[in-house]
Image: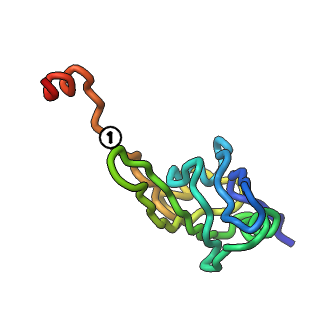
Amino acid sequence: MARRAGVGLALEQSVPGTLCYVADIKPGGSAALHGGVHIGDKVFGVDGRQVNGLSLADVGALIAGAEGSALSLGLLRTTSVLFGPDKEERLEIRLRRGAAVASDYNQQGAATPSPPAQMAPYDTQQRQQQQQ
């Protein structure tokens, strides 16, 4: 019988029945190696199943599975913008349960790591000159 394993995420739930969110990402775990999961992301689906209204324990039980098996997480990422309403983005991330290696995300058919978000540096002097 295969061992049960997770993907290296610590989840929390602020109020019972609401979506669980990522509170921590274990270094070296599948989620950390993938790079596409961020602290604060909300989990809305596990392997295509909606998890609205489930307890933290129930969501954790869905994420855990046979070590080495693939898992699809539906994530809701909220990004604050300076002017205007927050932006919500739905993502689907494919991970492998258990001890992960970098090659899982390059050659084995699991998701390829997402590139890091690119942001232009905020130049205070340039901004002040534009306002004058």
Q: From what the image shows, is residue 73 above or below residue 130?
A: below
In the figure, residue 18 lies in which quadrant? bottom right
Residue 113 in view in this figure: yes
Which secondary structure, mark 1? loop
Q: Nearer the viewer, residue 103 or 30?
A: 30
Q: From what the image shows, is residue 104 above or below residue 123?
A: below
Look at 12% across and 23% down and name the residue there: 132
| Residue 51: % across, % down | 68, 73
120 relative position to 116: left or right: left
In the figure, residue 45 lies in which quadrant? bottom right
Count residues near mark 1 (Cα–Cα under 10 Å), then give few for <14, some for 14-19, many for 20+.
few
8 relative position to 38: left or right: right
Residue 66 in view in this figure: no
| Residue picked out by circle 1 | 119
Amino acid type of disc 1? Met
Q: Nearer the viewer, residue 19 or 113?
A: 19
